[in-house]
Structure formats: C-alpha cells, structure tokens
Image (tube, helix red, strand yellow):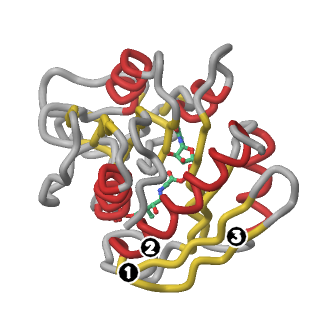
C-alpha cells in the first residue's frame, strides 16, 4: 500500500447505468461494480478522500468518504458534476450507457401482437465533459473493448483528451462481472504499461500507484 494520494480529492464512477423503458424494464449492461469499487478502496488506502458515484450494484461498499447511488447516466452525470469542483483526480470506471430510450413510459409497455421499435437517444459523455472543464482534474478513463483494444483505447484517450486510459478486454467471461482482470495503461505521450491478469483488488492497487506517480510527475516534475 502507498500513501501516494495523501489528502487528494478523488471522484470515481463505478458499476453500470440502467436506462428505464417503463416501470419494470430497463437497458443495462454486465458491469458488477467490482473494478470501480476496488479502485475506490485502493484510492482510500493510498490516502485519498474518495467520493464514489455508483450505478446499481450489489458489491460490499468500499471504505470511502462518501458513496452516492444513482441509476441512470443522467443521474450519474448530475452527481459527478455536483462534486467535481475542487477534485484533484477523476477516474471513470463506470460502464455508462451510451444511449437511453427517447421515451420512458410511466405504465408497463403492453405487447400488442407486433414488433416493437425503440428509439434511443445519446447520453452525455461524463468523462469527456469532465476532461473539458476549464479547471479539470487529472482525468483517467477506462476503455472496455472486445477487439483491437489498443487502437480503440488510444482513440478514446485522444478524442476525450484524457491524462491516462486503462484499457481492458471484455466479453467471453473477461472484464465484466468476474473477479480478476488485466489492464493496458496508455498515456498521451505514447507510453504504455501493461498490468497483467490478477485479482481486481490487487490490480486496482497497481493502477492507483500508476495514477499517483503520473499525477506527481505532472504536478511536481522536480
Ligand atoms: O464492473 P465490473 O464487472 O468489475 O467490470 C469492470 C469494467 C469492465 C466495467 C471496467 O473495467 C471498465 O472497463 N469500465 C469502463 C466501461 C465502459 O463503459 O467503457 P467504454 O469504453 O464504453 O467507455 C469509455 C470511458 O468513457 C469509460 O471511462 C466510461 O466510464 C466513460 N463514459 C462512457 C460513456 C458515457 N456516456 N460517459 C462516460 O463517462
């Protein structure tokens, strides 16, 4: 355990978002919250004051200064933006839905014998919005990819103007809803650092060490 984030204010998102179709149905994804919760615990262990904004998940709560539970991407964005001022580091580990239903019915949608067409509208990109703030925190994204991990993650790093991205392979029992994971860390200057497969809690510790070192390198270069 390091004390590399002593007294730093860190906001972390974790888990999935659920986008409601009606009172009983939603669009969601397979994120369990394990990875984000492990990162939150590791940041606390490194001395940070952590605010965790969590989508719906069943994991044991890590030790954090504050946990805020949300359901949808819009709610997650609202809580992140409410708490981001004065934050030193933002880590976006949540699997935020890119789209939500254009309409949410307040009554259960009935089967009427034919096919049902759903219109989806784009959600705001929380990570890109944080990175675009005039007084932005050190901003770390995740990239969940089924293929061409490095190419896609690099594109996200550059497009969203991040300080670091942690890419992971997902699908076929990897990444989502399992106990271990591997990450490829990418930096804007072209450096890369693989973190091999291990339990999400120890992987989170390694990631937090790398974030602390990079934060230090940028803010106190001598
Ligand atoms: O929760 P687990 O079961 O432990 O699984 C962990 C994980 C696989 C969910 C995690 O390691 C991970 O990869 N999290 C990011 C998942 C994701 O949504 O990746 P993405 O490539 O679609 O998004 C890229 C980045 O933009 C992410 O930091 C995401 O939080 C952010 N984003 C995406 C869309 C959006 N509307 N707003 C965002 O902030």
Residues at marks 2 and 1, CA–CA distance in whole angstroms: 8 Å
Asked which secondary structure carries label 2, the reply is: helix
Give residue 53's position: percent from left, percent from top: 30, 36
Give residue 164's position: percent from left, percent from top: 67, 51
* Residue density around tag 1, few if under 14, some if 14–19, many if 20 or more, within 10 Å: some
> In the image, is 185 to the left or to the right of 115?
right
Q: Earlier in the sequence, mark 2 or mark 3?
A: 3
Give residue 58's position: percent from left, percent from top: 14, 57
**Nearer-the-camera pick, 121 or 31:** 31
Q: Earlier in the sequence, mark 1 or mark 3?
A: 3
Q: Nearer the viewer, mark 1 or mark 3?
A: 1
Q: Are marks 2 and 3 in contact (CB under 8 Å)?
A: no
Q: Quadrant of the N terminus?
A: bottom left
Residues at marks 1 and 3, CA–CA distance in whole angstroms: 18 Å
In this view, 150 is above or below 157:
below
In the picture as drawn, the residue positioned furthest to the front comes out as: 222
Would residue 15 be seen by someone viewing this image from the given angle?
no
Q: Residue at x 20, y 32 (%)?
A: 22
Q: Residue at x 70, y 44 (%)?
A: 163
Q: Nearer the viewer, mark 2 or mark 3?
A: 2
Quickly name the residue at label 1.
Answer: 180
Label placed on residue 144? none
Q: Quadrant of the C terminus?
A: top right
Label placed on residue 149? 3
Q: Quadrant of residue 75?
A: top left
Q: Residue at x 63, y 17 (%)?
A: 135
Asked which secondary structure carries label 1, the reply is: strand
Q: Are marks 2 and 1 in contact (CB under 8 Å)?
A: yes
Quickly name the residue at label 2.
Answer: 203
Q: Earlier in the sequence, mark 2 or mark 1?
A: 1
């Amino acid at each position: 355990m390091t004390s590399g984030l002593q007294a730093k204010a860190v906001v972390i998102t974790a888990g999935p978002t659920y986008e409601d179709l009606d009172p009983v149905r939603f669009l969601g994804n397979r994120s369990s919250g394990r990875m984000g919760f492990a990162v939150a615990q590791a940041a606390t262990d490194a001395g940070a004051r952590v605010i965790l904004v969590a989508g719906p998940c069943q994991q044991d709560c890590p030790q954090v200064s504050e946990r805020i539970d949300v359901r949808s991407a819009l709610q997650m964005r609202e809580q992140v933006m409410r708490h981001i001022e004065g934050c030193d580091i933002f880590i976006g580990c949540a699997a935020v839905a890119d789209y939500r239903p254009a309409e949410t019915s307040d009554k259960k949608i009935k089967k009427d014998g034919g096919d049902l067409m759903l219109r989806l509208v784009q959600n705001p990109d929380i990570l890109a919005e944080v990175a675009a703030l005039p007084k932005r925190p050190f901003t770390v994204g995740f990239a969940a990819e089924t293929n061409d991990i490095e190419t896609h993650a690099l594109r996200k790093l550059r497009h969203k103007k991040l300080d670091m991205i942690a890419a992971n392979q997902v699908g076929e029992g990897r990444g989502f809803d399992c106990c271990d994971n591997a990450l490829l860390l990418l930096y804007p200057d072209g450096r890369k650092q693989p973190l091999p497969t291990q339990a999400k809690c120890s992987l989170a510790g390694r990631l937090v060490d790398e974030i602390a070192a990079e934060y230090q390198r940028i803010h106190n270069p001598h």
